[in-house]
Image: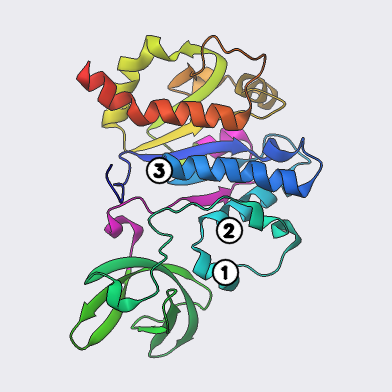
Amino acid sequence: MTWPPPKRKPHFSIAIPASYTSDLPHLRDKTVRAGVIGRAAAVFRVDRIVIYLDRHGVESEGEFLCQVLRFLDAPQYLRKRLFKLSPLLKYAGLLPPLRAPHHAVERDVEKMGRSSFREGIVVKSGRRGSLVDIGLDKLFPLSRTLPVGSRITVRVVKRRGGVSVKLASREEVGVYWGFEVEFTGKGLRRTISDLDADLIIATSKYGSHIHRVAEKLAERLSISSSVLVLFGSPHEGLFSIARREGFRLEEVSDFILNTIPLQGTETVRTEEAVIATLSILNVLPSLCRSG
């Protein structure tokens, strides 16, 4: 086992519909279902979760999903500062812990390595710089003036004279660093267009069985820099959503995959499709190379 795990190459995004939780009447159940998606995304090192508007009237569901998933991705030591009390987060205590590399639990500077990365939030800002909370026993100065409330990544550097922090980008970290979440408020086609991924994979029970296109897909994965994987809703598959929006799914997708051939149930839930698809895409390149 390699820990912490490296970043995925290529950059991975998944797109799920805003109506993903709309068939559940209780906020508690919606929260638990959202947590399943977030947990699966972290397990398979997804970089971004995009929520698209699959039909009008579920905008509030999209906003809820976005809020809950952002809360789940945030390190526990930052949540009180990042999120105000909200009825949308009433059952956030039911969310599963991610235990991803950016969810650092160490609070003793002395036990940290000479150089490590942590997530932080800007709590004060002025002409001379900012003060940042990174979940340790004190606030740390940063020589950059940043907006209060900004979530940032910093490099923590230990020297004989003490500890200092420097602003860092997610790309500098080198290991998997959680996922970003966006609710586009746009339909499927516009969402796909705006994301401009190199490789677009749609999932459907009417798609090609994964074993029939595995080698070709693995080759495309190896030369792509950004991948977008599309999932349908509990009410409609991607073909139906595309047809209602007035376009053909084949026009916007490089592959349309059935990742659960010969399914033993009449329907496959969105979260089940996410887990099945991401697990296959996680190992497909190495399997094809070894074969």
Which mark is on residue 82?
Answer: 1
Q: How far is the residue under mark 3 from the one under mark 2?
A: 17 Å
Which mark is on residue 71?
Answer: 2
| Mark 2 residue element | helix
Q: Is residue 51 above or below residue 154?
A: above
> What amino acid is found at the position of numbered circle 2 in the picture?
Phe
Work out which quarter of the rendered image holds the N terminus and state it: top left
Left or right of residue 99, residue 144 in this image: left
Which callout, 3 or 2, points at the residue further toward the start of the chain? 3
Residue 187, magenta (yes or no): yes
Q: Residue at x 62, y 22 (%)?
A: 268
Residue under label 3, please give it: 45
x and y percentages locating residue 116 in the rendered image = 28, 67
Let me know if residue 209 appears in the view. Answer: yes
Q: How far is the residue under mark 1 from the one under mark 3?
A: 23 Å
Q: In which image quadrant can residue 145 be found?
A: bottom left
